[in-house]
Image (cartoon, rainbow, N blue to C red):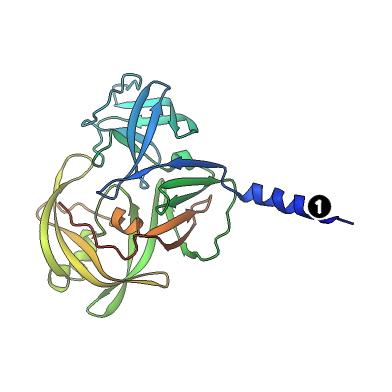
Amino acid sequence: MLTKLNILFLLLSYCIIVQAQEIIPFRLTPYNNIIVKALVNDKDSLDLMFQIAMGDASISPERKRKTDHIIFNKDEISENNTLQLGKVVTKNVRFFDNELTGHEADGKFGTGVFSGKVFKIDYDNNKFVIYDQLPDVKGYQAIQLYPERDQLFINADNFIDGIGIEGHFLLQSGYSGGLLYNNQFAEDHELNKKLQVTGEKTLKNSSGKSVITKQGILSQFKIGSITMKNVSAGFFAGDLKTQKVSYFAADMLRRFIWIFDADRKTAYIKPSQYFSTPYYKIK
């Protein structure tokens, strides 16, 4: 028969197992980008932006800090690097050179550092939390993920003229804004006429190409059972219309706390402290 002491010991042991294994602190910039202090190959200290839409890592041509110990080949690829984020060390990390990144960053890192693990993006406490198994998700809502290589997609409803239209969105933490619709969706649903357009901006993609976006307001957006009102939304315009995917971008991501399961087929979300804050204005 188990004594009370044994039962208490088992409960404590279980709690220790499901507790976070590792924590990586981050800083959220005014541009909604996540920045982490990184050490590469035990030598190069960098500020890297977290890009949820990639698996590997990259260095920006506009970096402020030296990267003397990341050796690139003729194809601008560097293999077998060691990346330390907080106390978390990942080996065999591939870096690409000359990829643009977010403000205040020397480069980017992706979800490869969380490979095979459950991870949490805690915007309330500015930290990633890495687990060996799924923690308690009471109070969270499960939503389906659609993984494609190193990218994660979700489905959500966009209300246009009062009608809910399902959209397929790439989780994209590098773009500071809210929703950004692909060319086909924008044309099929005449967003130029039906979205409340508030302005126009010229942006650069990671390859340095200029693209024109029109900014507007979507009256209602629904992810799972969570409804959001007057959401910041944009779409591509101009001659260069090469955008094939829609973005659920950084200003939307920060409005939730996220837990991603190990196989990246389900995410668990709940509103963060930023859920009802004003939307970011693209500069």
Left or right placement of residue 248 versus residue 42 in this view: left
Dot 1 amino acid type: Leu
Residue 30, position in %: x, y?
25, 49
Q: In the picture shown, does residue 154 fall above or below 74? A: below
Report helix, strand or loop for mark 1.
helix
Residue 100, position in %: x, y?
23, 38
Left or right placement of residue 129 versus residue 234 in this view: right
Q: In the picture shown, does residue 153 fall above or below 205? A: below
Identify the image quadrant of residue 80. Answer: top left
Left or right placement of residue 198 versus residue 137 in this view: left
Depth check, front residue: 161 or 130: 130
Depth check, front residue: 163 or 104: 104
Q: Residue furthest front?
A: 5
| Residue occupying the point 72% across, 54% down | 11
Q: Residues within 10 Å of mark 1 (few under 14, many from 20)?
A: few
Q: Name the residue under label 1.
A: 5
| Residue occupying the point 42% across, 26% down | 81
| Residue occupying the point 40% across, 28% down | 39
Residue 234, position in %: x, y?
19, 61
